[in-house]
Amino acid sequence: MDFFARQDHARKLTNRLVWMFALAVIATVAAVNLLTYAGVEWYLTETGARGTRRLNVEAESGQSVGPWITDLHLKAQLAATLVTLAIIGLGSLYKTAQLRGGGPTVAISLGGRPAQPERDPREQQLVNVVEEMSIASGVPMPQVYVLEREEGINAFAAGLGQQDAVVAVTSGALHQFTRDELQAVIGHEFSHILNGDMRINLRLMGLIHGILVIALTGRLVMHMAASSGRSRSSRDKGNGALPILFGGIALLVVGSIGYFFGQLIKAAISRQREFLADAAAVQFTRNPQGMADALKRLGAGSARAYVAHPRTSEASHLFFGTATTASFTSLLATHPPLPERIRAIEPSWDGAWPAASEAPIADLGHRSSAVSGLAGTTARITADSVAARVGTVSPDQVAFGGELLDSLPTAVHNAAHDPFSARAVVIALLFGPDRAKAVPLMDLLERSGDHPLVREVRRLHPLVAGLDARARLPLLEICCPALQQLTASQRPPFLALLNLLAKADGIISPTEYCLTRLVTAHLTPPSSSHGGIHALPPLLGPASVLLSALVRFGHNDPQAQRDALAAGAARLVERGQSLTLLAVDQCGPVQLDTALERLTQASPGLKRRVLDACAWTVAADGVVEPGEAELLRVVSMMLGCPMPPFANG
């Protein structure tokens, strides 16, 4: 199953989740109505015992008591249904609103903090492994968090999309995983990112919270009843607090039903995807032993994967291993049993668990200042292979990611992890390798008045200018987690400065567009629209803008431009449809931004066709220059389709 098929499967799974949630709500409402019916019957019995004369008088006067009782039942059950739906709906909306911050919100809520690679060699190793996997997959570099108070061995990935993704590991995992085991676990988490599991998992958290609110309400009512009972005399306690206490118990029982269904939904969504992520990690690293050994560490002793934070239960389905100590039946378990996961990778495993031990830290030094794997500057690709590359990770790509990291000067790599210095790295990338072109831009930067930033750019630009062309975009991605630590007041001035520098010569080159567009995407809230357009006609206008921009960049001859557009259109349009070659002022940066925003709403199948058309447009002349390859990757990434670097020189 390729990336686009997996994304389509994730969309269908989301629809399935909604239906399962609806059934859970129906079951919860039914339970509330049963309790309401019993409560009304108890009330009528009590009322009849104290008011027999009134009911007899009503009967003697010819009034019917039966319809009155039926009407009372209906009104009580209608009220109970509306209140239950309101509690569930408001609870789900509240939790969903809390999760709008994406991965960082989840990591912080579980006690996480950003990794500090400059202070701890183990955290440096973790960040290096995540960077390698990010480069290899083309996934935007996720923010890296550490749950430093958790001694259990565990990890998770969370986010609403690739732009706000977080990869987090516990302190226990940092200290006990070897580098191979850590790489396997990070590969497992990247599989969740690529497969769209993160968004499903956060939606699951939001929806299920609404059901669990009923149990929380029951606990609150019981607490109020107990407090009320203590403040009354023993004579009043039975008359006032006891019914409230029973009501709280009833809500707690109903909430337990909701909790059962919540766990059932988690299990139905999560278990099979854990097997798939394990297999993907083996495929990414070509190291099944690393994955098997990582899983064995989770079972070496009691509660080895346990995460102690009080909010762990609501996020249990996010984790690499079972993070709670609650004993569930196999029906409700969010993860498959460890022995099954291990034997799926290592069939000959003898069942022995390893002893707990402190893992050594791998060599963190650079292997060389220039890596042979980065030799060459022209990306040789075929148009029909581009869409197939999306969402793939291979051992060769992972190795290339490590080589690329080793090619970065230490000063540049360190600067990319600091929010202040990362700004300077991005500006140095914008200046480009032509140092003569950088002179007027440096003068413009000096006029901004930010002298510390100017000094940092002067220090880093000579190092950045000497980088291989294929290292530029990955370096930008490495900077983005640090840039995301900028405050809300720091982001707009930086983006304004970046756009000012890009427009300084009156022309925004494709490289400048790629850089400013990616940084803007990382520093602005992610779009909430995913896969809403399933037909091609609404996308023909945006597709014309996109393909025209690619044509204008890669071809100067009018006939070559028409041929390139025709080559791309042939891969996209259907009978009776056509694309228009637009003038330069109709497919500029502003128009391209609007077109890409619209195209992100396309279904996965349509995105595949759009990317295929882009590839055939770019490769129409038989040559893909580095700038064209970079632009192609950025377009793919902006559509939410991560594309690995073109590593072959």
Image: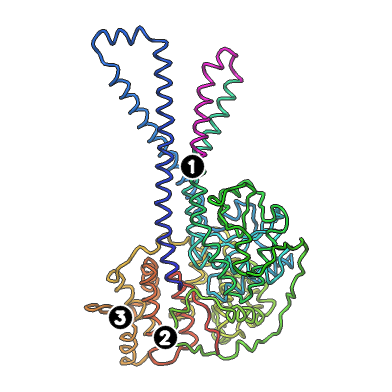
Which element is circle 3 on? loop
Q: How many other residues sit within 10 Å of disc 1, few (<14), some (14-19) or many (≥20)?
A: many
Q: How many other residues sit within 10 Å of disc 3, few (<14), some (14-19) or many (≥20)?
A: some
Label placed on residue 258: 1
Q: Is residue 299 left or right of residue 62?
A: right
Residue 642 on image: x %, y %: 49, 73
Tell us which disc is closer to us: 3 or 1: 1
Report the residue at 73% width, 75% height from top.
364
Which element is circle 1 on? helix
Location of residue 302 with respect to 400 vertically, above or below? above
Q: Kindly report the distance in space between the C-alpha atoms of the residues bearing marks 2 and 1.
A: 51 Å
Q: Which amino acid does label 1 sit on?
A: Gly
| Magenta-drawn stretch contains 476 | no
| Magenta-drawn stretch contains 250 | yes
Segment tinted magenta in the rendering: 230-258
Give 371 or 280, whichever is nearer the viewer: 280
- Secondary structure that dominates the magenta span: helix
The picture quadrant where one finds residue 481 is bottom right
Q: Kindly report the distance in space between the C-alpha atoms of the residues bearing marks 3 and 2.
A: 22 Å
Tell us which disc is closer to us: 3 or 2: 2
The scheme the figure's colours follow is rainbow
Q: Kindly report the distance in space between the C-alpha atoms of the residues bearing marks 3 and 1.
A: 56 Å
Give 47 or 198, whichever is nearer the viewer: 47
Nearer-N-terminus badge (2/1): 1
Q: How many other residues sit within 10 Å of disc 2, few (<14), some (14-19) or many (≥20)?
A: many
Q: Name the residue under label 2.
A: 383
Q: Name the residue under label 3.
A: 582
Nearer-N-terminus badge (3/1): 1
Report the residue at 66% width, 76% height from top.
412
